[in-house]
Amino acid sequence: MPQHHLHKQNLSIERRLGDAVRARLPDPFGELVMFVFKQAWACLFGGLLLAIIITTKLAWNPDWAFQRYDFLFLFAIATQALFLRLKLETWEEARVILLFHLTGTAMEWFKVHAGSWGYPEPGLFKLMGVPLFSGFMYASVGSYIARVIRIFSMRFAPYPPLWMTMLLAVAIYVNFFAHHFLPDIRLGLFAATLILYARTRVWFINTEHPRWMPMPLAALLSSFALWLAENVGTATGTWLYSGQIPSKTVSLAKLGSWYLLLYVAFVTVTVVSRAALSPKRLTATEIRARPKNPAPTPQRPKD
């Protein structure tokens, strides 16, 4: 099946839902509702995982032969397969999700053995103390980034040279491991994200008019949403940080960790697909003239 035709099928459900919402709501209220609706649609995978985590916590009986962690793992696999079957995600996006799944699982193994956090419940699908569903929680972040870029027809401009962004992403990822043995350089990494991405605008089209926000601000807002999701995970006892009790709020320091990890996730997306990146500054007119939701064919912009 041609890629362009496949992509049109991928967008059919999203466009029908969006048209239905716009037809029933006046501006500017419709603009706000559409933004929230699109964001919720973009994080559908992560939202379903959070919903099943809460549901199983409320309904699961620890005396059952089948463990809760194992159910979460099978649910995540089935959901991912369903997304591909219904073309809610493209295969390009699936490759991004797989890559982030692997890097996230590697971090989980290290952090659990370092005592940063743990998974208190038993499970068959548990390797080196880490339940295999945990990788899908990282994958849901990659899923969100890949989907939100497509759903909002995003452009990132002017985007820094790729080698610089990849070097920063590697430094952030390595620091998550190295700070257990070496000085923590996260303050320097925070500064590096601001320096490198200060000029980068995240252009997006919510309904008709192109809008933008600075990329560091977009990362901060996204990290706050992930911090809230972390609180859901710990409140249900699905995982716990060292010394934390389920009723205790996750430290705001974790918000900073997610802020940095989002840059790793975004650069991971660019390894597979770079169609949304532009090395030069763009104007609203140029964004408006660009076809909405172009096929996500991998491209390599000039550094």
Image: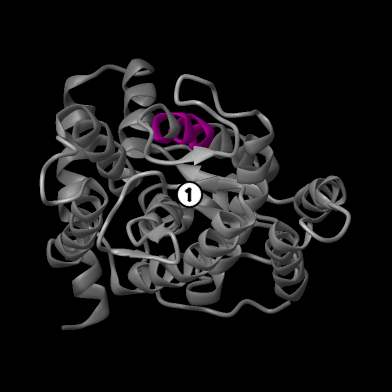
- Mark 1: which secondary structure? helix
- Location of residue 187 by image quarter: top right
- Tell me which segment is drawn in magenta: 225-233
- Name the image quarter holding the N terminus: bottom left
Q: In the rendering, at what x and y percent does residue 201 appear? A: 66, 47
Residue that mark 1 sits on: 288
Relative placement, left or right, of 172 versus 275 is right
Q: Is residue 255 left or right of residue 96?
A: right
Identify the residue at image location x=46%, y=71%.
102
Q: Closest to the observer: 64 or 54?
A: 64
Residue sitting nearer the eye, 223 or 194: 223
Q: Quadrant of residue 48?
A: top left
Which quadrant, please, contains the C terminus?
A: bottom right
At 62% from the left and 60% from the top, the residue drawn is 264
Magenta-span inclusion, residue 90: no
Relative to 271, residue 259 above or below: above
